[in-house]
Amino acid sequence: MSVKGMGVDIERVDRIARLIREYDDEILQMIFTSYELEQCKADLSGLSYAVCFSAKEATAKALGTGFVTIEWTDIEIHIEMSRVFVCLHNEALQIANENNIKNIMGCWSSFDNHVLVHLIAEG
């Protein structure tokens, strides 16, 4: 496998937690998939939501497109301990296929009320 792209993002946990409290379900479903909402719902601190949000940003960077043509829900984040696995759908999957990206994964850490996510796109 070879590295096809890298993505890094940092987010404030309290900022994302505030947005989660303020937005209604309809808005949240435009950002997070059903799987992500289920995965994060028990986390009252907002840390899991911040990891998902930051990992989506890092994924869009690793794909080299940002969110110009990709919907937020085209990127689905699976958190396992300090690791992040990415499942792509629709336009994001098409971009990955066009660029021979077979896998996107990485790690996350938290510090000082921030989440930092590093991802590598492999082909």
Image: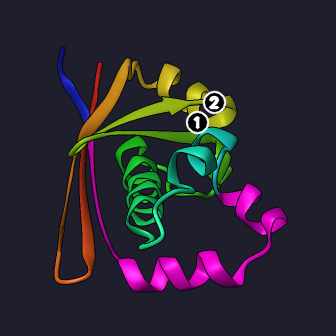
Under mark 2, the amino acid is His
Q: Quadrant of the C terminus?
A: top left
Judging depth in this view, the residue of 97 and 32 nearest the camera is 32
User: In percent of the image, x 20 and y 46: which residue is there?
Assistant: 82
Q: Which of the 4 image quarters holds residue 10?
A: bottom left
User: In percent of the image, x 60 and y 26: which residue is there?
Assistant: 94
Query: In the image, is 114 to the left or to the right of 24?
Result: left
Point out the stretch of residues depicted in magenta: 6-31
Examine the residues drawn in magenta and state their main secondary structure: helix
Q: Is residue 69 visible?
A: no
Q: Is residue 99 above or below residue 51?
A: above
Question: Marks 2 and 1, Cα distance to the nearest angstrom?
Answer: 6 Å
Numbered label attached to residue 4: none
Q: Give the residue at mark 1.
A: 92
User: In percent of the image, x 69 and y 84: which residue is there?
Assistant: 22
Q: Give the residue at mark 2.
A: 89
Under mark 1, the amino acid is Ala
User: In percent of the image, x 84 and y 63: which residue is there?
Assistant: 26
Q: Which of the 4 image quarters holds residue 99?
A: top left
Asked which secondary structure carries label 1, the reply is: helix
Q: Does the magenta segment cover residue 21?
A: yes
Q: Quadrant of the N terminus?
A: top left
Query: In the image, is 1 to the left or to the right of 11?
Result: left
Residues tagged 2 and 1 counted as in contact (Cβ below 8 A) = yes
Q: Does the magenta segment cover residue 15?
A: yes
Q: Is residue 36 above or below residue 113?
A: above
Viewer-nearest of discs 2 and 1: 2
Q: Which of the 4 image quarters holds residue 23?
A: bottom right
Q: Residue furthest top?
A: 1
Judging depth in this view, the residue of 56 and 69 nearest the camera is 56
> Where does residue 93 sit, x and y in percent of width and height?
57, 27
Q: Is residue 53 above or below residue 72?
A: below
